[in-house]
């Protein structure tokens, strides 16, 4: 089937975004290479920049591969665009909701008095543009006329049948989030961050073991969700329930927030990071993070229960059908 103009323009946008990300990564590498040693006094800052560069390369590779797949009308490229759009919407909605209420440092006398207002409006509009683009792609790549361009269709006895059953979009996005989350574990281990489990810090190797176990479970869950395995559904529900209870424990258990704040302060001092702006209460970012974490876990649980039937009705594999 002939490729539509909308698919071609989407591929061009993907290539353009990948090129911009690659250019930004190039300038970051140059800055990292020629920056004075005193500008990055701690191994953490250097490690964070290296991790950011690796992540940037991964997203560029994902974008280029997806763009080529769109040009060649590959089904996996359409799915990739849907997954990327869902992830982009979620992570852009978070700053859109936070920025209007985030306290700003005192303004310099050289700036206009309404600079803060224009900054908030501009930042919200910037993230809103990506939310609108992601929403459009979710709509566009789910249109029947567009889906038909990517479907592998076989004709038997005069009837057109799809080559394989289609997974729910929300489950595909969740599967990718579980896999991506599991892949972040090496960076967490590099930072030597203690695990904070049900209001108590677990430092050292025991904390690292908790991160490794949850990463392995997250990766297994992501792969299982992609294959619509019932055990993956149960594992995903269990992991998100633990995450939701862990976030709620910060509020329900006396002294939990104080212990978490003390842990973050000691971690910041150990990494020689600068102090947070005094205009922002230390409890504010902690509360925002806990609220977003609890909301995120609740949304995932709702999606899992909404699509539970998809796992019950999952088609058997060829080996199971024999």
Image (tube, rainbow, N blue to C red):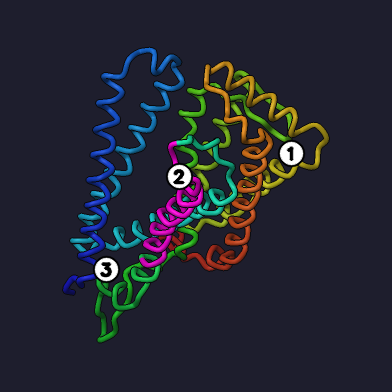
Q: Earlier in the sequence, mark 1 or mark 2?
A: 2
Horizontal side, residue 212 vs residue 69: left or right: right
What residue would you read off at disc 3?
150
N-term-proximal mark, 3 vs 1:
3
Highlighted range, magenta = 110-136
The residue that disc 1 covers is: 250
Is 269 placed above or below 282 here?
above
Q: Is residue 13 left or right of residue 186?
A: left
**Would you say residue 242 is visible in this rendering?**
yes
**Mark sitting earlier along the chain (2/3):** 2
Mark 2 Cα-neighbour bin, 10 Å: few <14, some 14–19, many ≥20:
few
Image disc number at residue 134? none
The x, y position of residue 262, in whole percent, is 69, 24
Q: Residue at x 57, y 24 (%)?
A: 275
Residue where numbered disc 2 is placed: 112
Query: Which circle, 3 or 1, is nearer the viewer?
Result: 1
The C terminus lies in quadrant = bottom left
Near-viewer residue (279 or 163): 279
């Amino acid at each position: 089937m002939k490729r539509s103009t909308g698919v071609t323009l989407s591929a061009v946008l993907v290539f353009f975004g990948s090129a911009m990300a690659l250019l930004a990564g190039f300038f970051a590498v140059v800055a990292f290479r020629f920056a004075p040693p005193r500008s990055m006094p701690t191994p953490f800052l250097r490690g964070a920049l290296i991790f950011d560069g690796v992540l940037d390369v991964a997203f560029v590779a994902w974008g280029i591969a997806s763009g080529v797949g769109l040009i060649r009308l590959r089904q996996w490229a359409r799915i990739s665009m849907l997954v990327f759009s869902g992830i982009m919407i979620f992570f852009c909605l978070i700053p859109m909701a936070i920025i209007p209420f985030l306290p700003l440092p005192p303004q310099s006398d050289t700036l206009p008095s309404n600079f803060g207002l224009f900054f908030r409006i501009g930042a919200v509009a910037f993230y809103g543009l990506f939310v609108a683009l992601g929403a459009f792609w979710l709509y566009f790549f789910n249109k029947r006329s567009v889906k038909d361009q990517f479907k592998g269709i076989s004709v038997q006895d005069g009837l057109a049948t799809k080559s394989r059953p289609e997974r729910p979009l929300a489950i595909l996005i969740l599967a990718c989030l579980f896999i991506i989350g599991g892949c972040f574990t090496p960076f967490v281990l590099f930072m030597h961050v203690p695990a904070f489990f049900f209001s108590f810090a677990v430092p050292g190797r025991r904390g690292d073991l908790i991160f490794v176990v949850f990463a392995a479970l997250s990766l297994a869950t992501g792969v299982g969700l992609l294959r619509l395995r019932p055990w993956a559904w149960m594992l995903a529900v269990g992991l998100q329930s633990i995450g939701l209870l862990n976030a709620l424990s910060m509020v329900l258990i006396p002294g939990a927030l104080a212990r978490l704040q003390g842990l973050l302060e000691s971690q910041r001092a150990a990494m020689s990071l600068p102090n947070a702006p005094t205009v922002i209460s230390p409890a504010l970012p902690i509360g925002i993070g806990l609220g977003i974490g609890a909301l995120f876990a609740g949304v995932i649980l709702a999606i899992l229960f909404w699509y539970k039937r998809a796992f019950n009705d999952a088609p058997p594999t060829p080996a199971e059908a024999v």
